[in-house]
Image: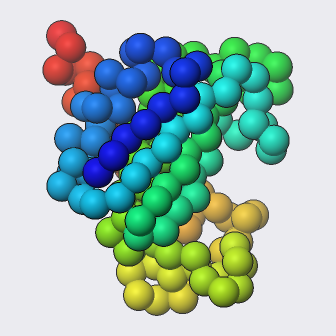
Amino acid sequence: MQLTFNANAPRYMTEFAAFACLYLGLDRLRGNIEIEYKYGSLEDNCYGQCWGDKKDCEIQMASRQWDVPISREEKLMTLAHELTHARQYLKGELLPTEEGRRIVMWRGTPVKYNPRCEESQPWEVEASKYEQLVYDAWRAFRA
């Protein structure tokens, strides 16, 4: 697996990403993950976003939301969350379909995407679980 960051990424973020990749087993997968850290907000004012397929993933991370700085802790937890999505894509567990974002394949089953209940979608439940696990393991590792 190849992991690249744009030049804006702070060092603590690249160090955390290396740890998270080992924790999540991304180091054992093939593919590319490109992370773009933006000074400012993302288009829809979320903390992070991930798109991908079995070969390539793109993650965008924001430094601000609604013009308010995002804390270091929240950035790292978001990065763990988005790297979990990258793992899902690279393993073929989460795949886009011809339908675009309306229907995705989750572990071989078509699932209708519902933006109103995004946090209850199975890939989001898993990513939310791992964002805390990875962050807690990182803190223990650094202690």
Residue 122 at what x, y percent from top left? 47, 69
Left-right relation of 102 to 37: right
Give x and y (percent) for residue 20: 29, 37
| Foreground residue among 34 and 108 | 34
Q: Is residue 41 above or below residue 10?
A: below
Pick out the residue farthest to the top.
143
Q: Which residue is rendered at x = 37% and y = 41% of the image? A: 3
The picture quadrant where one finds residue 132 is top left
Q: Quadrant of residue 98?
A: bottom right
Residue at image location 49% in from the left, 44% down from the top = 34
Locate residue 84, reporting x and y percent. Answer: 39, 52
- Vertical placement of 142 versus 79: above or below? above
Residue 136 visible: no
Q: Nearer the viewer, residue 127 or 13?
A: 13
| Quadrant holding the C terminus | top left
The answer, for residue 34, to whether it is visible in the render is: yes
Residue 30 rendering spot, x and y as whole percentages: 28, 60
Q: How many marks?
A: 0
Q: Residue at x 18, y 55 (%)?
A: 28
> Which residue is located at x 34 percent, y 26 percent?
16
Q: Is residue 92 left or right of residue 24?
A: right
